[in-house]
Amino acid sequence: MNTTLKTYDTNEFQNYLLEGNYEKCSEYVNKILKEDADIKFIYDEILKKSLYSIGEMWEASKITVATEHLASAIVETILNEVYFKVITQSKVDKRVVVTCTENEFHQIGIKMVSDIFQMNGWQVHFLGANTSTDELAQMIKKVNPDILAISLSIPFNLPTLEKTLDKIKSDFPDLFVLVGGQAFLHGGGEVLRKYKKLFYKPDLNELDNFLKLN
């Protein structure tokens, strides 16, 4: 099925999140799955856009941090529910380390990125939130990945990302790095342009296309 944004009212899902109504959120997503929607559509156009909007509400003090945390917890549970759509028997001999920077506690975006790599048959080393730069460097040395993928949600943490990239590019200058996340909706491109073999991917479709070509 060629699912488009016109097919579904994403505000409905977002309202269920704001209400903390897990049952309705799960029902909404499973309805789309039964109609053979692309998992990337669900991730990008339903889950991610809803969380981006809720994150902006929190930044503007329109909702409490508790409401934002509850919405994130519901989405994480739904990601676990739909994981069966991610698993593939087709494997490639490529490895990726996926992570958030230090002081970055929003790991849902990088979990979605991890799932896209898995859908493309990659061996994924998922480090999650708040990974120290030194520990990340140790993991890269141990795993020797083809790609490092980093997510950044909070613009305030951009200097921390820059510190991480300085360290990683100094130690592993030939490593390909992919960067994305809500923080870059507010700028930050001038930081990324400093580094060689670094690519910004704004959404999961672009990431999926990149992996299929490389």
Image: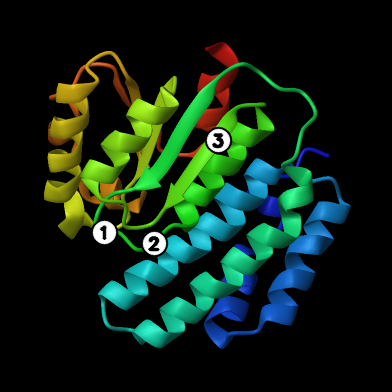
Label disc, if present, on residue 154 of the rendered structure: 1
Q: Is residue 58 above or below residue 134?
A: below
Figure disc tally: 3
Mark 2 or 3 closer to N-term? 2
Q: Residue at x 60, y 17 (%)?
A: 212
Q: Could you tell me which secondary element the residue under label 2 belongs to?
A: loop
Q: Quadrant of residue 61?
A: bottom left
- Mark 2 or mark 1: whose residue is earlier in sequence: 2
Q: Position of residue 176 (x, y in %)?
A: 35, 20
> Residue at point 28% right, 13% down?
174
> Quarter-wise, where is residue 98 in the image?
top left
Point out residue 190 in the picture as x, y percentages from the top left corner. 13, 33
State yes or no: discs 2 and 1 in contact (Cβ < 8 Å). Answer: yes
* In-front residue for pair 125/2: 125
Query: Pointer 2 and pointer 3: residues touching (CB < 8 Å)?
Result: no
Task: Give the CA distance from mark 2 to mark 1.
Answer: 9 Å
Query: Which amino acid, by three-letter code, is at mark 1?
Result: Ile
- Mark 3 — residue? 124
- Which structural element holds mark 1? loop
Rate crowding at label 2 as few (under 14), some (14 to 19) or many (20 or more) other CA atoms within 10 Å: many
Mark 3 neighbour density, 10 Å: few (under 14) some (14–19) many (20 or more): some
Q: Is residue 213 above or below residue 18?
A: above
Q: Which residue is mark 2?
A: 106
Q: What amino acid is at disc 2?
A: His
Q: Nearer the viewer, mark 2 or mark 1?
A: 2
